[in-house]
Image (spheres, coloured by chain):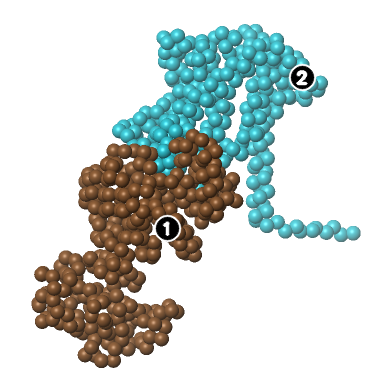
Amino acid sequence: MATVTLEDICKNYGNVSAVRDVNISVADGEFMVLLGPSGCGKSTTLRMIAGLETISSGTLRIDGERMNAVPAKNRDIAMVFQSYALYPHMTVRDNMGFGLRRRQKDKAVVARRVNEVAASIGLTEYLDRKPHALSGGQRQRVALGRAIVRDPKVFLFDEPLSNLDAALRVSTRAELTRLHRELSATMIYVTHDQVEAMTMGDRVCIMSHGEVAQIGKPMDVYLNPASTFVASFLGNPQMNLIPATVSEGVVDSGSGKLARSGLMSGSKVILGLRPEDLAITGDANDAVLSGRVISLEALGAETLVHIDAGSGKPVILRGGRETPARLDDVLHLTCKPHMARFFDAETGLAITPGDTQ
Amino acid sequence: MSARTIAVPVSGAGLRMAALLLLIVVYTLYSTGPFVWVAAMSLRTTTEIAANPYGMPWPAHFEKFASAWFDSNYDTYFLNSVTIVLSAVALLTIIGGMAAHCFARYRFRFKSALYFLIFSTIIFPPQVTVIGLFQIMVDYGLYNTRVGLVLVYVSIQLPITIYILEAFFARIPKDLFEAARIDGYSEWSIFWRISLPVAMPAIATTVILNTILLWNEFLYAVVLITEDDKRTLPLGVLRFLGDQLEDVGMIATGLMIAIVPVVLIYVFFSERLIQGMTAGAVK
């Protein structure tokens, strides 16, 4: 296994900058998730690590060794593609052994290793089939098996679950987590699915417009987003972002107030409140927000209440199944003060109360 | 006793089907007619044909085939055809495959111009280029050689081979090539181990097309080959064409010897041919 370090990595296509000054350090045995919307540069970054794209500037190191000019085949990495990229003319056995045969000439060793890995991921009975005779989930496992067989320094995953149905995605997620635990391998995983990022990653690197927006443990990033972009990208429904003004230790949202010291009086901020941190209160004086219910979504285990609090975008409250709200009700919402987050209204960056602004 | 007419209802779809069937039958008769006629003549003597050109082959003179094969040098022509066509098709497949792989996979300077240049050669009819080609072959000592004819065959069929294969290679997902690169294979190995095997339907199509076209090729062969021992099967008929007499019966027999392998290839591989022509993206 190995460490992977990206130092000021950039990727330009002519005058277009796809990735800018990316700095990521992946520890030995760590599961790092690159998360972001389409076009944010996460796949390009992964492909640069794989050696499938050249690096315009910056330094890539694997186990401390500079890899910029090292061809993909000499980087000792394995990659699982979104399309699985199985060789259609080969059996599962040949697909899994294809990479190993290049490095290991002893056919008996290759066969033994393929059999071992196939047994560990439940592919033994499919070894003599061709990819077209397999289901999507089985193909995905073959792609995984092909990577494991080689015992590489680093595993790279490019949205490997995107083509699976919802149920299969859940079970494969669990299988990948189990594999990571068993192999203790360094894994870098690209996805746009925040559930995958939250449940699988040791750390998450959120990317936006070719830059790193935040790196941290999933819950840390969720609870303490570094910017309004991260706040709105992580979480479903996303964090409520309400423009507010600060006046002598009180944050005024326009429809309610929240006492909070440490913020500069007179400044304009964005108040960030997760839907699950909001609660209904009967006392308008306690309310951080107030507004009329404009729609209700009963999802079975929970209810999402959309409220027009006059901030432009509806505020969403995530309540239990029995949430006492009806359409057109006027609700007063409160929250635990320590769960409120603040962002600079101009830059969108997080403000920690007490920071000098 | 009064006559009764029974009206059988005929639907519009039924009428259309009947018209279509009739059209297919007429077209089949039209296209197979000459073949059947030559096949019948191949079993008749020239005297019999002169007496009744459209007569049936009774009695059938099968000995004419043996006579053509052993007495009229058709065994040599057949061997020449097999050697020249197989060599040309093998070279076409390898060179065309490599060129198509490059055009489909790599971006390089003047790619479009080069592609256009190669492909533009098909717009010239062979009658235009054959004179110049004749002079080139003489200059390079390739005139009246089997190697020369192979090289000419490769050059005339290369554009269409590249065109068919390039279209197929371009549909192979690039992830496959990238996976092979990560698996440790060089570009050369990737071509042999991934591109060619995956493109087998298209390769089969070009092999069959090129074999049929070159097997029947007459113009270049007649211009560039003069020695009898180097002739290919389509030139075999020249043996039965004299200034005063045309041995029509033996010409038909010679034609049948030349045609049968092509018909057999088509019968056994037509499904593969259609598969390759209509193959979609690789799953």
- Dividing the picture into quadrants, the one containing residue B228 is top right
The residue labelled by disc 2 is B62
- Dividing the picture into quadrants, the one containing residue B46 is top right
Of all residues, the one furthest to the bottom in this rendering is A283
- Which chain identifier belongs to the brown chain? A
Compared across the picture, whether B53 is left or right of A179 comes to: right
Residue B160 visible in rendering: no
- Which chain identifier belongs to the cyan chain? B
Compared across the picture, whether A265 is left or right of A203 comes to: left
Compared across the picture, whether A148 is left or right of A216 comes to: right
**Dot label at residue A45:** none
Q: Position of residue B42 (x, y in %)?
A: 72, 21
Q: Label 2, secondary structure: give it.
A: loop
The residue labelled by disc 1 is A181
Q: Label 1, secondary structure: give it.
A: helix
> Is B173 located above or below residue B156 in the figure?
below
Name the residue rendered at 66%, 37% in the picture: B28
